[in-house]
Amino acid sequence: MCIGTLHQHLGPVLKALVMSAIQDISVRSHVEKKFDTNPHDPSVLANTQRRCLVLKNDDGNEAGGVATMGIIIPKTDLMAELPSDILKSMVCNIV
């Protein structure tokens, strides 16, 4: 179960978040057992190799420095898309 590995890396923060969201008692006990068998180890995170899944060089390889995004993000001038009287419609008159 990946929750044990996540607990090794993230520790108490993950445990608090997960335990606050679980309502089912049987699921809660199962997850608590996974947390107990996979205690938080801060050294694991320090030894984990990190890599970017988004930034790529132009040749498609992982970026080492300056890179382009591996995805295309559309660019839109939002101000040009808004109607010219947008501020009038946003005004709220408080009496």
Image (cartoon, helix red, strand yellow):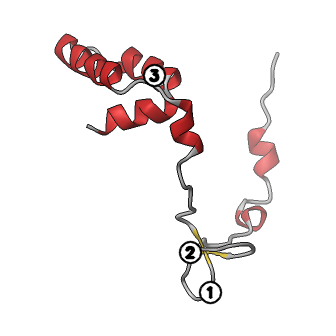
Where residue 36 sits, quadrant-wise, is top left
Percent x, y of residue 70: 56, 75
Q: Quadrant of the N terminus?
A: top left
Side (left or right) of 92 relative to 44: right
Which residue sits at x=52%, y=23%? 13
Which mark identifies residue 14?
A: none
- Amino acid type, label 2: Gly
Q: Disc 3 designates what residue?
A: 17
Side (left or right) of 64 relative to 14: right
Q: Residues within 10 Å of mark 2 (few under 14, many from 20)?
A: some
First of labels 1, 2 by sequence position: 1
Q: Front-most of 85 and 51? A: 51
Q: Front-most of 34 and 22? A: 34
Which residue sits at x=40%, y=15%? 20
Secondary structure state at the residue bearing disc 2: loop
For the residues labelled 1 and 2, the Cα–Cα distance comes to: 9 Å
Q: Disc 2 designates what residue?
A: 70
- Amino acid type, label 3: Leu
Secondary structure state at the residue bearing disc 3: helix
Q: Are marks 1 and 3 in contact (CB under 8 Å)?
A: no
- Amino acid type, label 1: Asp
Where residue 62 sits, quadrant-wise, is bottom right
Q: Are marks 1 and 2 in contact (CB under 8 Å)?
A: no
Whether residue 81 is situated above or below residue 2 in the rendered picture: below
Which mark identifies residue 58?
A: 1
Q: Front-most of 17 and 89? A: 17
